[in-house]
Amino acid sequence: MTRVKTGVRAVGAVLVAVLGVTAGLTGCSSTGGKRAEDARKAAAAGGRAAVDTPRWTFGMVTHSGDGDTFWDIVQSGAKQAAVKDNIKFLYAHDDEAQQQAQLVDSYIDKKVDGIIVTLAKPDAMKGALARAKKAGIPVITVNSGSAESKKFGALTHIGQDETIAGEAVGEELNKRGRKKALCILHEQGNVGHEQRCEGAKKTFDGTMQNLYVTGTNMPDVQSSIEARLQSDKSVDAVVTLGAPFADTAVKAADSAGSKAEVATFDLNEKVAAGLKSGDLGFAVDQQPYLQGYQAVDLLWLYKYNADVLGGGKPVLTGPQIVTKDQADELEDYAKRGTR
């Protein structure tokens, strides 16, 4: 493992950078307007390294399909941390587990200095992580696969516990007096999605049914939800498992003439706007920006100082239930791509 002493100057620079970001966020939330716009531009600008450690290369491989805005936010956090930590950041994705494993292998072949990976379909990824470990490449898992992360040899896992997040949804539905809900699963075989719905069923006092849809085909998603709502007028809540599907569920409810309230996991600009307008009841934010940022930062800390967070347990970034009350504050952060 390569370590470089950067001295007081580098550590001081890190503190200055962190304090500067914190101050910028505080100003943005308190004044809005021009400062908010300036903050968005600054976030996009990138900045420069705050340390003089070697230019290590970290690769991230996720199970994202094309066009999923959630992963844009994860990347935004990872890229921002990479700039600060003088990291060359690589990103690849594939929603087919075998292809995702091959992408991890390609980074191993490139002899990257660290790998960040999701374990939505953990069995298919086990061999790739074993090969990374054999090659001496540290791995951090993010977003999905918290139960398998340690077993597969990862340093730590960063994300939310999907079962706990689901339980929070069930409890929120109870507070809202809901009696019958649909849980919309848009990716079959994703263990995290199943855990979300199971968690919600566990705490929900009413009835919850799973509805499987083809997440890569939005017209199919809308028609499937619409058909179920038309056939069962007693459904009074729809829970989607990803921000891009929330707006589609709202359209489906409108077309079906349903009064069902739509809620969703994850946050983006459209979801924040939907919360503000009342089209959406609530969202479960797992802070994807933080997942990407912390993954890169923790790999850097491991390379620099052999630091590991979590003590063998996941480092949780959620869940946080957000409603119309928080929409104004979050909307601006969502517009700049950090929430």
Image (cartoon, rainbow, N blue to C red):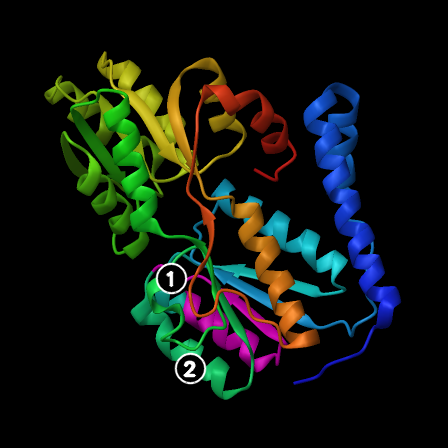
Q: Which amino acid lies under the numbered mark 1 shown in the image of this protein?
A: Ser
Q: Which residues are magenta?
A: 100-120
Residue that appears at 46% across and 44% down: 286
Image-based side of 298 in relation to 105, left or right: right
- On the image, numbered disc 1 is attached to which residue? 146
Q: Is residue 290 above or below residue 41?
A: below
Q: Residues within 10 Å of mark 1 (few under 14, many from 20)?
A: many
Q: Name which of mark 1 and mark 2 comes first in the sequence.
A: 2
Does dot 1 land on a helix, a strand or a loop? helix
Residue type at mark 2 is Ala
- Tell me, yes or no, whether the highlighted magenta stretch contains residue 102: yes
Residue located 26% across and 27% down the image? 173
Q: Nearer the viewer, residue 68 or 33?
A: 33
On-image quarter of the N terminus = bottom right
Write the residue at 36% across / 59% down.
120
Residue 324 lies in the magenta stretch:
no
Q: Is residue 286 left or right of residue 14?
A: left
Q: Quadrant of residue 172?
A: top left
Which residue does the numbered mark 2 point to in the structure image? Answer: 130
